[in-house]
Structure formats: C-alpha cells, structure tokens
Image (cartoon, helix red, strand yellow):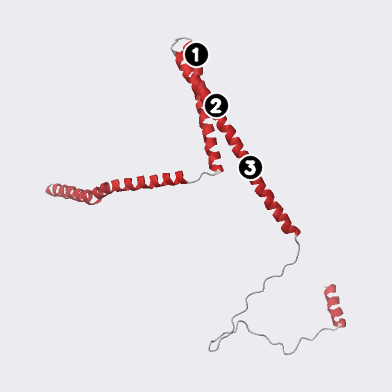
Amino acid sequence: MENSAGLGGITLVLAAVVWLFIFVPGYTKRSQIKETTKLIQSARRTQEKSRVQTDDDRLRRLISTQRGFSVIFMLSALAALASVVAATAQNSWWFGFAVALTLSFASFVIQRAAASQAAKLAGNIHRARQRVRASASKSQAQIVKDRQWSPNPLPTPMPEVRKGELVQPLAEVIEISSPKKSLAAKEIDEILARRRAI
C-alpha cells in the first residue's frame, strides 16, 4: 500500500515537471506565433493591394459580384413575396415588403450592371487573344512559306595544343591499308540470283 502511494506522488511530480518544461514554454510562445501570423497576413494584404489588377482579375471580380447580387436578389424577392402573403393577415408586413422590394430592385440593378461590364471586359479579352493568335499564325505562315536555304553554323574550332600539354586522342584513327576488292558485274549478278532463289 505504501508503494502505490509513493508511486502516485512520483507520478504527480513527473507530470508537474513535464507540464513546466514542455507546456508552459509552448504557451508563452503562442503569443509570438500569433504576432508572426498577423504580420505575415498584413504583409500579404498590402502586397495584394499594391499589385496591379489585370483584366482577368477584374473579370473574376465582376463575375463574383454578379453571382453574389443575384443570390441577394433571389432572397429579397422571396422575402418580398412572403411579406405580401403575411401582409394579407397583418398590415405591419407592408413595411417589410417595401424594404424587401427596394433591396431586390437595387440588387437587380447592381447585378445587371456587373453583368454588362463583365460581358464588355470578356469581349475585349477575347478580341485581344484573337489578335495575338492571328498575328502568331501569320508569322508561322511566313516561316513556312520561306523555304530559303540557310547554312548550318559551323562549330567553334578546337583549341590549339599548347606545348607541354598532354592531349589524349579523341578517337582512334583506323587506317585502311588495302582497300576492299570491288565486285565485278558478273559476281553481283550471281549474288542477286542466289537471293532471288531463296
């Protein structure tokens, strides 16, 4: 019985030591980690603000605006319809109907304006890309039509051997001392006749 009480006390002391040396420093460093992440996020935000928006970025933003306001339009139209139904029972719902109708009309106007600007910008982007493709295809056609011969550039000459340098031969030179005997027409005909017979 005394051993179990002693082991329990030792276990409690070990747990306290582990808590002091592992968890407390991590808890104190947590504030440093939070400050570092805040600095990184603020630096990223300033970098994104200073970056020049391209046409694709503006188009993406206009499309997201159009989608967001179309959702608001649908929800406010449903709210206006529900408030009309509720106004038949109680007259105080007419105020909600007016607010929902105004909100739906404003969101519809904003959604349509964003859609028209997005359509214009998409058309400009498409025309610019078509111009680039057309000019690239014209230059490619000119390259294909130009069938003029152009010489291959010669490689640079090898450096001259300096005195005192040991240069190993790049390849062995095979000397042909006795050229191979050329065949006569009769011998060639015999070889071809044997091949045809097979």
Q: Where's residue 146, x and y in %?
A: 75, 60
Which residue occupies 47% across, 19% down?
A: 99
- In whole angstroms, how far apart are the C-alphas of marks 3 and 1? 47 Å
Classify mark 1: helix, strand or loop: helix
Q: Which residue is mark 3?
A: 126
Q: Which residue is mark 2?
A: 109
Viewer-side residue, 8 vs 115: 115
Label 3 vs label 1, nearer the camera = 3
Q: Which residue is mark 1?
A: 85
Q: Horizontal placement of 136 versus 187: left or right? A: left
- Badge 3 or badge 1: first in the primary sequence: 1
Q: Where's residue 144, x and y in %?
A: 74, 58
Quarter of the image with the C terminus is bottom right
Q: Is residue 33 above or below residue 85?
A: below
- Badge 2 or badge 1: first in the primary sequence: 1
Q: Amino acid at mark 1?
A: Val
Classify mark 3: helix, strand or loop: helix
Q: Horizontal placement of 77 versus 192: left or right? A: left
Viewer-side residue, 50 vs 92: 50
